[in-house]
Image: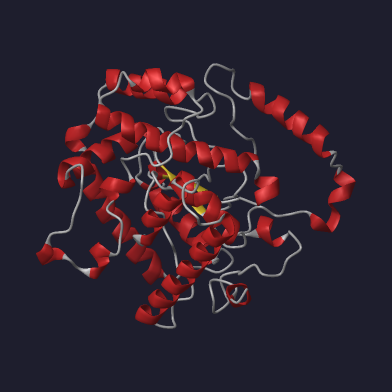
Amino acid sequence: NPCWMTALSLLLSKKHTCSITPEQFERIAFSLCRLEAHRVRSSIGKTSRTVVFTLPGQACTPLLLPLVQKVFVHERHVFVYDGCCHSVEMGLALRKKYGSSYRQKPEKEEWECVSATPQVISATFPMAPLKHNKELTETLSKLKGDQASIVEAWMASVDTFLDMKAKEKKNFYTPFVCRMGFLMARSGIGNGDGTDKSGLALKNVLQYITGSRSRALSEEVINKALKSLKENRIKSEEAVKEFKLDNPGKILIEKCVFAHKGILIGEKTLIDTVQPKDDWSLKAAKKLKSCLCCAPGEEDEEDEDEENEAGGEKDGDKGKDEVDMSVPGAFASNTGRSKYVDGKAAFAFDPAQFSK
């Protein structure tokens, strides 16, 4: 979560007024990620082959996600999201803790803090507003100012995700879609009887990130990850305790989200959200794209029929080119290029690309 990502987001938000071209933005993002990966490996040692980059927050997602996907099309991508109401509660907690504007105090200017973007900024201020949605303006006006900015930032990030998923055949965007509710062991979010599946959800994410689905992760790694998840869960629950939304507040926020029409609200999940399972898959068996005003699956069948007709794909055409979407990066590796990194190579990025 380096702070230069936020600076790059601000430049991208004003790309029409600055002299930097799209190609230069791509080179900048690629070069800085390579340098950051080199710094991390140098500080940790040669034992670490996978370097994970996290975007600063939902405010930067609409600007950075398309760029990062285009530059690193053959890398593994994870899209982690939370419900809008939960995001508002956390955003309000961050503002209470740090204030609306955050600055490191001189006595606490440590590199880890200074080099990272403060969450209070990247999670609560929309950098790419949803200008194309006319209904949203009216619904947002009924919320408090601090809540409205968080809701708009959340909606803009999810809108970008949905747009990229709709074009995945062209941009090859097939990420591991992870709902925070699974990791936080919240009941009622696709987990049936409320059984805690956070451990399994965490294991699935780690398998994808490290490319180790076919080989078991060490107990040491799993235990450390579970301990860290538990600590962060406790901190998160404690932080939002005084900012829990009441039912009227949740209804107002859900009305804002519903103005988008394409975003499912409440306890619904985004398209292709990976369910916590031992045999998890990047692609859902059935895409949940219908809005709440439609019967479940009503639009899905129509969309699938249209997609099949447009593609003209027949079963006999698949043959050896069929993709197993349960394998990390399988979609990208089927594009005919050989630059995909499978997690076992010494470099997280293709060195040949850096010299171009």
Query: Residue 150, located in which quarter of the rendered image?
Result: top left
Residue 329 vertical position relative to residue 259 in the rendered view, above or below: below
Q: How is the image coloured?
A: secondary structure
Residue at 59% x, 18% y: name it. Answer: 295
Residue at image position (43%, 23%) is 136
- How far from the left and from the top, in percent, is residue 306? 76, 29
Residue beneath the point at 54% across and 61% down: 24
Side (left or right) of 265 relative to 356: left
Q: Residue at x 26, y 28 (%)?
A: 145
Q: In this rendering, would 340 be left or right of 30?
A: right
Question: Looking at the figure, which quarter contains the C terminus?
Answer: bottom right
The furthest residue to the right: 316
Using the image, determine if residue 220 lies above or below residue 67: below
Q: Image check: 156 left or right of 318?
A: left
Instruction: Point out the image quarter for the N terminus.
Output: bottom left
Q: Is residue 8 visible?
A: yes
- Report the residue that reaches farthest toward the left: 107
Name the image quarter holding residue 231. Answer: bottom left
Q: Position of residue 25 (x, y in %)?
A: 52, 59
Front residue (pair 151, 321): 151
- Residue 324: % across, % down: 70, 55
- Which of 7 and 17 lies nearest the eye of the viewer? 17
Q: Quadrant of the rendered structure where residue 286 is? A: top right
